[in-house]
Amino acid sequence: MPKVTSHLSAEEIKNLVFQLPTREFLALVDAIEERAETIAMMRLSETGFKEWNEEGENGETRSHHSQS
């Protein structure tokens, strides 16, 4: 599917979305919720990796520690 570039404001998009038939509106809500959950999980994982890569007490990064 080709990408379409538009210069609609968030308010204009909201007005268009609210004109959708109920079934299509609810399907869009489900898709937006799924995308929001994905973004939230990505942010959590980024935070986890940042913490993992912070320097430890001995100056090494945690990701370089040996697992024994």
Image (tube, grey):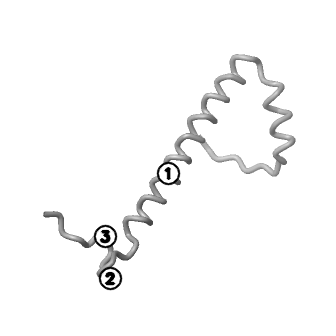
Q: Can you give x and y, in whole percent of width and height, for residue 29 in the image?
A: 67, 29
Q: Earlier in the sequence, mark 3 or mark 1?
A: 1
The total of numbered circles placed on residues is 3
Q: Tag 2: residue type? A: Gly
In the displayed image of the protein, which residue is found farthest to the left?
Answer: 68
Q: Tag 1: residue type? A: Met
The residue labelled by disc 2 is: 59
Q: Can you give x and y, in whole percent of width and height, for residue 25 in the image?
A: 72, 24
Location of the C terminus (image quadrant): bottom left
Q: Residues within 10 Å of mark 1 (few under 14, many from 20)?
A: few
Q: Classify residue 34 as left or right of residue 16.
A: left
User: As displayed, is residue 56 above or below residue 8?
Assistant: below
Q: Can you give x and y, in whole percent of width and height, for residue 10 in the image?
A: 81, 45
Label 3 vs label 1: CA separation? 20 Å
The residue labelled by disc 3 is: 62
Q: Tag 3: residue type? A: Arg
Name the image quarter holding residue 57: bottom left
Q: Nearer the viewer, residue 29 or 58?
A: 58
Q: Nearer the viewer, mark 3 or mark 1?
A: 3
Q: Can you give x and y, in whole percent of width and height, for residue 21 in the image?
A: 77, 18
Residue drawn 86% across and 41% down?
A: 12
Q: Nearer the viewer, residue 56 or 7?
A: 56
Label 3 vs label 2: CA separation? 9 Å
Q: Secondary structure at mark 3?
A: helix
User: As displayed, is residue 16 above or below residue 49?
Assistant: above
Q: Classify residue 34 as left or right of residue 19.
A: left
Residue drawn 55% across and 40% down?
A: 37
Q: Nearer the viewer, residue 35 or 5?
A: 35
Q: Which mark is residue 42?
A: 1
Label 2 vs label 1: CA separation? 27 Å
User: As displayed, is residue 3 above or below residue 51?
Assistant: above
